[in-house]
Amino acid sequence: METFINNKYSQWLLSLWPLVILTPVIWFPQSSVLTGHPWKPELLLSVIIGIVIILGLIKNRELLFTFGSVPYINRAMFAFIIWSGISIFWAVSPNSPIHHSLVWTAYLLFFLLACFIAANDRLLRLSFYGFGIILSIVAANCVIETLLRPTLNETFGFRYGRYAEIWAAALPLFLSFAIRLKGNHRLLALAVTSLLWLGIFFSTSRGSLAAAVVGLGIFGVLRLLANRSIKDTKKLVLAAAGLFILAVLTQLPALLVPSETRTATIVRAATSSETDPHNSLAKNVRYLFWATGLEMAKAHPIIGVGADTYGLEFNNYKRVLALDPAKRPMIEKSENAMPERTHNEYLQIVAELGVIGGIIFLGFLVAVFYYGFLSIRRSVSSSENILIHAAFAGVVAFLMSSAYSSFSFRLVQNGVVFFFLLALMLRPLIKDKKEERSKTFSRVISFAGLICCVGLAVFSGLKATSQYMVYAGEHGPDIETTSRNYINAKALDNANASADFSYALLLFNSKQYEQAAKEFRLSIDKGVYTATVYSYEISAYSLAGENDEALRAAQDAVSVFPYSVFLHTRYAVLLEKEGRFEMANEHYQLAESIEPEQALTWRILIKDGARPAAQAGREGKGVPLLVELYPQDGMYAVLAERGIRFPEEKFEFPK
């Protein structure tokens, strides 16, 4: 392997791994509703690893992979991959376990390569440069966008919240460079460290900020325990003071000049749910995700519901929560939520893979910390022990963030950072390990790894093509071309819910209502299960004359959203049309008991149209403005049906 590492092409290729972190921000055509598994980081990582394996087999014909240096970590990951793959037999969709298993296989292969990178000084330097440049680009963009944009919406938070987790994990590493290096290299390290710290604050991610503080604290404690030099202690104190001053300067403007559109991260972290309804909503949604995951774990404690199927199973277990009135605060106002993840990696693993998967993953974590402590002990007298301390702190910060993050190992660009830091943490053990290695075993692992990389690349490529087909369909020149694009998208990736949803809208607008209803149901089953999509399904069945199916869809909708004023009113109006007045009155009274003004406006809008609803608001009946209806997308779904039933209303939407 050493001759392979010394090959300049291999070094160049391996040093490109930080580009995986940048892939999510690279523009690619996307549909109006984006769901399903990500594919950009998976595609690039699988291509890099696959080419590395091919070059190794061609150029050197010797060992590429070994489980020897840290066997318990590698074996635990291997067991986790196998159990994840086996869950395909009971998962609601085979795509999700396949994706999860292939991603963790890529993690294992990358970790084995990262161990070789960590053991090679030149490769490690190249990785540090690339890692720092990529992180700085994204962090600088976050800072600039925060300062220049007048308002920061949810898209901003999601875009940079996922990177804040990476910045928190990488922060101790680049701080260690700022302490250890000299001259221009120190200035560069200080610049990267400052950008990462600013990025964490400007992303307004409370979880990442907490993880960063804990990681820095662990790093500081390890340095104080390992170094008795007054000079090193002074550097550490100066670094801590610098970060504190930078944080104060960052937060001070928002503290001195409060704004509805900009809130200091520190204030946001300290705000209670009782004093900030928006903050409460965010917290309640997270509680809902956790509670739903717990219900999955209770229902399938041993084997779980299947790897990576949390989002697909969410509705089924949300119904169980809806039966408990005490759960109302976390369930209501969640009509637009499309949760793909629990916001807790450990809970999601147990929910999806049961106690068996949880024990395997726990074994992985135990092995990580076991080897981590061994590595710290081995490097006590080493001049580069500061790197080991920084990597250990970053690993802990990442694992801490995983307890309340939606990203963690679920996003490949985040996962590779963890495994790179893990390999760096184990550098003393990897460099000192001398062992006899089996060429046969190595080749088996290499070929198996290559097959998995090809599988992940093909899987990701199909998803990319399917996504593009949906985009092309939504911008198609005619119905025939658009329809063909949607059908091809569904064929390439049958888990692409956006293809079903967009195709359903096309069929709906083409007056093919029965088929549209079936496509809306498919999109719901695959994860696009907002109250608005349920409303479209109800409309499609109703327009098709399938009144019983429309009632069934409405009943299903209110079971998933038991505190939705919109859906209860929608159901009540349908029941009235069928002459079931007593039941209709029950549902309308329930809607009124939740929010009477919303219920009244929804009733007028659904029965009489937009103009009477707006006029009622001006007269002090219901909500003052139609834009205050919740969910707002539901209003457009209702108007779409009325525009078909009453063409004269189509262009009467009040301004």
Image (tube, grey):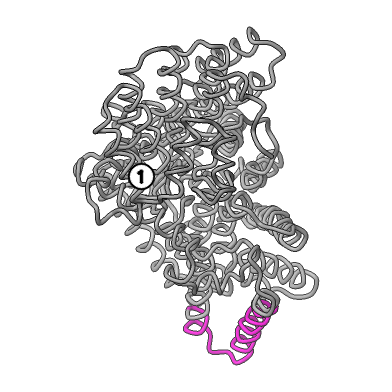
For this rendering, which residue is in front, 367 or 246? Answer: 246
Residue at horizontal 56%, vertical 20%? 646
Res. 428 in view: no
Q: Taking 597 as reference, is 185 left or right?
A: right
Give, as a three-letter code, the residue at label 1. Answer: Ala
The residue tagged 1 is 591
Residue 221 at what x, y percent from top left? 48, 81
Q: Quadrant of residue 544?
A: top left
Residue 448 at what x, y percent from top left? 44, 29
Query: Which residue, as the protein is rendered here, is positioned at the far right?
Result: 184
Residue 504 at what x, y percent from top left? 51, 19
Find the magenta span and give its range: 222-249
> Badge 1: few (under 14), some or many (20 or more) residues near its Cα, within 10 Å?
many
- 59 in magenta: no
Q: Taking 603 as reference, is 647 left or right?
A: right
Residue at horizontal 52%, vertical 44%? 412
- Dot 1 falls on a residue whose secondary structure is helix
For this rendering, which residue is in front, 620 or 181? Answer: 620
Vertical side of 307 occupied by 538: above or below: above
Query: Which residue, as the protein is rendered here, is positioned at the far bottom?
Result: 230
Residue 447 at what x, y percent from top left? 47, 28
